[in-house]
Image (cartoon, coloured by chain):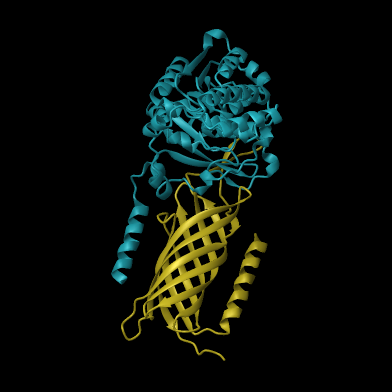
Amino acid sequence: MFKKVFFTLLMSAGCWCLYAQNLNELRTGASWFGENATHPGFTLNLEYVRRHSTGISTPMRADAGAYFHPRNHNAFMFDVHCGLREHFGRRFALEQYLGLGFMLAFYNGDGLFQVNDKGAVVRVSPSGNPAFMPSVSLGIWIAAGKKTDPERWAVHLRPKAFWQLPVNNLALPHFALQAGITYRIKTLEKRK
Amino acid sequence: MRKSLIILLSVLFLSACKKDDEFLHKGDYYFLENNGAVMPVWVRGNVSSGVFLLTLHGGPGASGHEFVLSKAFRALEEKYAVVYWDQRFAGLSQGNPPQSSLNIDQFVEDTEKCILLIRQLYAPKSLFLLGHSWGGGLGTAYLGRDDHQTGVNGWIDVDGSKNDTLEMQYVKQWVLNKAAEKLQQGDDPEFWNYALEWYTKHPKPVYSDIEPYIFVSAGGGDVYDFKKFNEINKIPYIRLFFNSPFSIAFLLGKTDISFADGINFSPELNAIKIPSLVLWGQNDGILPVPLSQWTYDELGTDAAHKQLYTFAQCGHGPHFEHPELFAQKVSDFIETYKTP
């Protein structure tokens, strides 16, 4: 488990450094994270955006959050995404992301039981199942700020496919819908 | 824009919090962990009756959750507690069990532990086992070994699989007959000639050969009347996707069924002495109907306490194709043999 956590953090740090060279915007936000759209969850987002032109930017986003699929599992997750945002006009953009992360899943039900060597049924506390979490997401991004600074606030809607790996020795696919809002907290000088 | 977002988030949140959805709130939903597998055990229905019916699903690798969608089991839930259990590597089971745990002894052990769980949590007055298809084999293997029949009131075998070699020969005969019929009618001669050719090349097929199931399915041996089947069984796909324990895992094939190649539970079948009910679809091509009589004959139960009933115009799933009659037959059997 610790190897997986370490590997994920290392990858995240690598991506972060790569992007940190050309940041020109730092944003933070929060999203609804609905596994299958309706199983409730949330993420907190931190986003570095490198603006290449008026039409193209490349966001790098870190999400931390949780979701709850009743009678199936609960998951706590952390993942980073590298993406492309294509702007159409001043307020509208389409996005696509590749992500890699880590999740810790717990069973969601009325109890987890084992039968011990003596044949007695015992209720046990789940320790959580670590898993990799690669993902692909598409998105609609809309600048929602005032006319003078439309991109200070933005809303997004992102359908996401992610995989929980391993479950039953397979990569188990999941779908999710992320809908939320981000706020620009800092504009950074572009390095040459 | 912000208003739209707030409305969207509110709708999502409210739909997620909806409390009346039976898939999320009806019954008790436990997980049983054994040798790497974490298997859901869903207890629904009339728990206060003290009569419990444990279902063993087919496959290997299908799901006990599909029984929940059958009108037959919903009718049985009115009178009894029904236990839906997903076996390892199947349905909505989780965990990361080792591939080496795909063996009969492990499945029998899992069954034993599931029964221990039910006994400890509910102390049922009466316990019945019902196995469909592969579950019929698993139930036979379980009951026919050690002293597992103790405390079990009765066994219900629904189109159950117990002898690979014998069954695959019956399937072969069913397909050959169907191919002859179809060729005579001029119905897709290319496909049915391929089926005949396949059997010429594979005279001794085994469980894990996929082709016989394709031939049977094409010949209507799994479902007798698809139109009627769909009318009877309206699956609430949207609710299952958005508001239920179901996930994509339900649709994924996770089991390498070759571990079941060559199984022969005849000795265990002979060893079963408890009251038994054998139910079968007369048009089943996956496990053709002559196997019902073979099962009945090989059961060790005294003739006074075993019954055989075959459903007319019915393929491999009588609980889906004739739910009312199925529930009636099972209920009659339970009423006869439950602990007073």
Chain coloured yellow: A
* In front of the other: A163 or A39: A163
Residue B95 position, x and y percent, is 60, 47
Residue at the (62%, 14%) spot, across then down: B298
Residue A49 or residue A42, whichever sits in front = A49
Measured as percent of width and height from the top left, residue A142 is found at 37, 74
Q: How many marks?
A: 0
Q: In the image, residue B199 lies at what x, y percent?
A: 66, 28
Residue B178 position by quadrant: top right
Residue A143, quarter of the rendered image: bottom left
If the image is split into quadrants, where does the C terminus of chain A sit?
bottom right
Q: Residue furthest top?
A: B304
Q: Quadrant of the N terminus of chain A?
A: bottom right
User: Residue at the spot x=34%, y=47% of the render?
Assistant: B19
Q: Position of residue A182 (x, y in %)?
A: 41, 74
> In the image, B325: left or right of A123?
left
- Residue B66 left/right relative to A133: left
The residue positioned 42% from the left and 80% from the top of the image is A184
In-image side of B241 versus B291 (left or right): left
- Please say if A52 is above or below A105: below
Tell me the cyan chain: B
